[in-house]
Amino acid sequence: MDQVKRRGVLCLVFVIACGGANGDTGDEDRGPIEATLNMGDRVNWPGLDQASGRSIPLIRGFGNGVPIAYWFLGFASRKTADSFWFCRQSDFDAGRCPLDEHRRLNWETLQGNPIFTQIPGKSDFSPFWQMWRVVVPDNYIPNSIKTPETLNAKKEGGEVSVEPFILDFGDFFGEPAGPQEVVLHCAHVLDGTTLEENGGEMPDGSGLMLELLGRQGWFQEPGEPGAYVVNFIDFSPSDGAFPEASDSESRPFMRFANIYIHWRFCEAEPEPGICYLENYAYADRRPVSERGLGQDITGDGDPNDTNNVLGAVPCDLQRQTELPYSPLWGPQAVKVNAAMDGTVSMIDTTRDQAVSDVLSADDIFANVDDGIFAEPVEMSEDETGNPVPGNEGRVFFNCPNPVNADFVPHPCAP
């Protein structure tokens, strides 16, 4: 615990120093950050200007034996950035702030908007945030602190306390976690951005999705007075909060889970139908993914069907050797051995997202044991063959799952 706290204090000093040392610049509301962005800046934000508007696509796949879906917010890193969340002293002392009993952001007790230290396009941006709790007096006026500069001045003056938020996670999916620094998933988006089918039907027919809401926070450009308004989607109602990864060092890392992406070799006999697609990045293989191929292979008018398999879904592990659910996914390439290609059906042969021989990680490893699939390997490129820098050569996707409307992340509903 002491080591965790010492590391957090060092992070705070670094963040505040970047914003400046003076607290007398004033915290004016400079309006939406979007007004300052050109088109080159905006392409770094998820969901930008799709044909149907600013929409984050819902991709379909499988997990734990049933159809699932996930929103694709783009590539992401395991690194975290800093965010500051305000609690009145009485609410913090009572354990009602900043999180509720289900490890969700408690908007009934949080005071004003959080402060974020990065935005998309900045070199250190991350949609995964180390959580700092700011304890303010009970007479605090919400949003009277909008910048790291003023926050630092108030802290130095003894008016507020600022510490990394430590939570006792106890047993985290069978793994003893104990007291850990907290990581949140808050995805920055431009105004008007929506999650495709948010609040609609669950892909497995189990009911309605939990509708996720947009919120607002503050961001200060270094060297400028005041703060800009940033919009973000709060994924804590479906994700909860996460303990830092076990391999975290100088600052918390985000945990990740496995997503399995299937590939067919074009040397198979007969040649797989998806190999007739020309001008693809790889001449010898194709992903069993409409998004990866750029075509509607199921012919249902929806270009987001895949035979991707998630190793875990919220509150559920099928294989005990899998990593627990995380919205950050490390892709694993699963290649169908060419000589065995005709023995396995997936969406490219069934033409039906509801029918596949491969619905779970158990199915994948059973096929590995039978020699139908090669052993999964980590991907260092995306599905179109483009290398992705960072993450020590690994690719990571930010792809949170929708959940049922009555879902609570902790304790997981029976």
Image: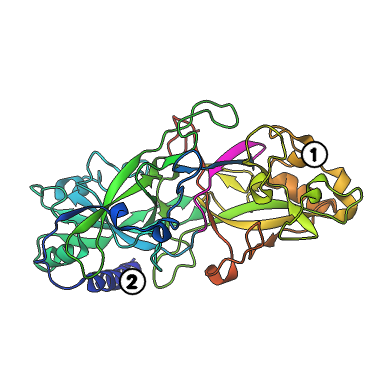
Q: Quadrant of residue 109?
A: top left
Instruction: Please give left or right for residue 368 compared with residue 99 in the image.
Output: right
- Residue 138 screen position, x and y as percent: 10, 47
Instruction: Please give left or right for residue 68 compared with residue 352 in the image.
Output: left
Residue occupying image coordinates x 69% and y 49%: 293
Residue occupying image coordinates x 31% and y 70%: 11
Which residue type carries mark 2?
Answer: Arg
The region drawn magenta spans: 63-75
Q: Residues within 10 Å of mark 2 (few under 14, many from 20)?
A: some
- Residue 283 screen position, x and y as percent: 78, 60
Which residue type carries mark 1?
Answer: Thr
Q: Is residue 143 visible?
A: yes
In front: 338, or 361? 338
Q: Which residue is mark 2?
A: 7
Q: Which residue is mark 1?
A: 349
Magenta segment includes 151 = no
Magenta segment includes 65 = yes
Q: Does residue 347 sit above or below 325 in this rendering?
A: above
Q: Quadrant of residue 334?
A: bottom right
Element assignment for label 2: helix
Q: Quadrant of residue 147?
A: bottom left
Q: Of tags 1 and 2, which is closer to the observer?
A: 1
In front: 193, or 207? 193
In front: 130, or 58? 58
Quadrant of the image for the N terminus?
bottom left
